[in-house]
Amino acid sequence: MAAEKPLLNALGHDAAYQLADVTKTEPQFAALTPRWVAKFLEFKGLKAGIYRVNKVVPGDTPLDALCGGDTERIDIPQGFVQYETKPREYRLSSISTILNVDTKISDVYSSPYDQIGEQLGLAIESLKERQESQLINSDDYGLLKNVADSQRIRPRKEAPTPDDLDELITKVWKDPSYFLAHPRAIAAFTRECTRRGVPPVTVSLSGGNFITWRGIPLIPTDKLFVDGLKEPKSQSGKTNILLLRTGEDKRGVIGLYQSGLPNEQSRGLSVRFRGIDDNGVASYLLSLYCSAAILADDAIAVLEDVEVGEYYDYE
């Protein structure tokens, strides 16, 4: 017969665990992204929630001019520059949610982390994720939906190639700021560069590392969907790549928000306490006001329907 295993004459794990302090993390938001679009986009605060983009009526030479060496003409030409009589107005859109917290829970279980603060923090992150998506995909002011027809191009083949990004640069050649693309699209472009022996250079910006093409960084965002999904399951799929010029002084793309909100927590975001009901549930209204404006047609261009599933055998 096998010898019986002697009992360990020491305090057991389960009993000791009851006296131990457990080190805990704050709640981890799995869907949180860097939100580079909102970080890199220049934002302008509004006082009344309306932003009017006044433009000159299109024309290459709105005014004739007399050059000093023109001896055939004597009179200086006269005229004026015409403005659009019905310019576009951008009105801020609201992204809102109501957060409920049981006061009994927040009273009893708020050490080491304040339950109300943690709940509000997660709700705010959720609103900002939605804002990032709306800046790109909104049917009203989203960048994808507001690219002029003349600024839309398609890839020469299917996968995004250096030639395609060069073509995008010809559309936004006046001081382009950055490309925007889904991480899968950036990976597809990098494979095309590797295949041609021209690996992109990497640059560090705002705490992140990004590959560049012609000195212009490619900024990743999962809000430029692949086949309508942030996280596509299929190896293949179609998506879009944007190129932007940003900044009001450059007649580029800018973000808009409402400034001076009551109970303002951050840019364009307010948190209002709505009271406590008869069941002891505290309620908070979170509202984020935002929009985006394209100041000139040539401030943005899009490479449409690029394939992200092209792979190569390098043997």
Image (spheres, rainbow, N blue to C red):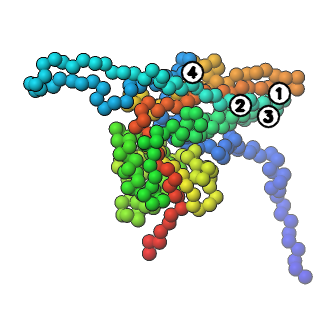
First-in-chain label (1 vs 2): 2
Q: Please, what is the three-letter code of the amino acid marked with disc 4?
A: Gly
The quadrant where residue 59 appears? top left
Q: Tag 1, which secondary structure? A: strand
Q: CA separation, marks 1 and 2?
A: 16 Å
From mark 4 to mark 2, how far is it between C-alphas?
A: 20 Å
Q: Earlier in the sequence, mark 4 or mark 2?
A: 4
| Residue depicted at x 40% and y 60% | 193
Residue 109 is marked as 3
How far separated are the C-alphas under marks 1 and 3? Answer: 15 Å
Labels 2, 3: front one: 2
Where, by quadrant of the figure, is residue 253 drawn? top left
Image marks 3 and 4: residues in contact by CB distance under 8 Å: no
Question: Which residue appears farthest toward the front when viewing the image?
Answer: 72
Q: Which mark is residue 49?
A: 4
Residue topped by disc 1: 281
Is there a contact, CB below 8 Å, between mark 2 and mark 3? no
Vertical side of 271 occupied by 140: above or below: below
Q: Is residue 234 above or below residue 38?
A: below
Residue count near mark 1 (Cα–Cα under 10 Å), binned few <14, some 14–19, many ≥20:
some
Residue 246 shows in the view: no
Label 3 neighbour load within 10 Å: few <14, some 14-19, many 20+: few
Left-right relation of 283 to 175: right
